Image: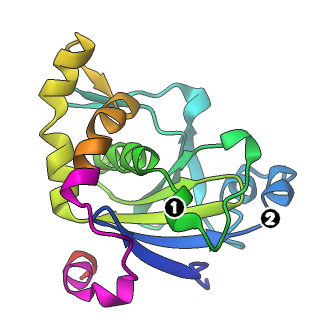
Amino acid sequence: MVLPWVQEAVLHGIYVKAAFFDGDKADRQANVVERILPFFPGTRARLSFSEGDRRNLTLGALIVQPDAVFALGDGLINVEYKSRSKRPIDSSQWHFEISLEHMLQCMLCGLVLAQTQKQIVANILRYHNAAFFLQPRPEVMQLTWNLITMACAYHEDRRVGAQQLARFASERVRKAFAAPPIHARQQDDWRTKRCS
């Protein structure tokens, strides 16, 4: 299978690969895999569960409900879908349109999936006409994870949802990794270690 990623960058300490497609065409597909993963034509991925199944997963005080989880080979694909009222992402401006809060929410779901299902997880943030493969630096997830207790106190609850934690942590992550967007090929050191 030819991988679809056509652009890449490092944003807020997260290595991001981007793919673009016809979102309206994808919405018309009857097959759920083709509808949610149109950027992987011919994939053998199988839907494991979706948001409609209302399947909550917990890790410590963090609770998540993934939008869609697919099984592929020995791993899982975690998809977080944000429709934005079907507003398209501009392929030349996506670095500025992609939401850090959305990225964190997606990666938090992936983290809990990986730990509870004991499988490798690929995190995909999906918009109407674009998909982004997310690989964070370990420090990004550590910083976010360390804010769980504060987020619980803020929401006056014993547990916190992925979206709540992502919103709570986003400005802190933004400040901690405040460098402007850098093309990924200029930042190979940590990415190579992460992917090896």
Q: Is residue 35 above or below residue 95?
A: above
Separation (CA) of disc 1 from disc 2: 20 Å
Assess whether residue 59 is covered by the magenta stretch: no
At a point 46% along the width and 46% down the height, the residue shown is: 102
Q: How is the image coloured?
A: rainbow
**Horizontal arrangement in the rendering, residue 11 relative to residue 62 (left or right):** right
> On residue 22, which mark appears?
2
Q: Please name the residue shown 39% across and 72% down the image.
A: 181
For the record, the magenta segment spans: 174-193
- On screen, residue 14 versus residue 5, left or right, reads left
Give the residue at mark 1: 96
Q: What amino acid type should be assigned to the residue bearing mark 1?
A: Phe
Q: What is the secondary structure assignment of the residue under circle 1?
A: helix
Residue 188 location in percent, x, y? 27, 87
Secondary element at tag 2: loop
Residue 85 in percent (x, y) is at 73, 39
Q: Is residue 102 left or right of residue 38?
A: left
What's under tag 2, amino acid-wise?
Answer: Asp
Q: Residue at x 61, y 83 (%)?
A: 1
Mark before the other along the chain sequence, 1 or 2? 2
**In front: 167, or 175?**
175
Question: In the rendered image, which quarter is residue 139 located in?
Answer: bottom left
- Magenta stretch holds residue 184: yes
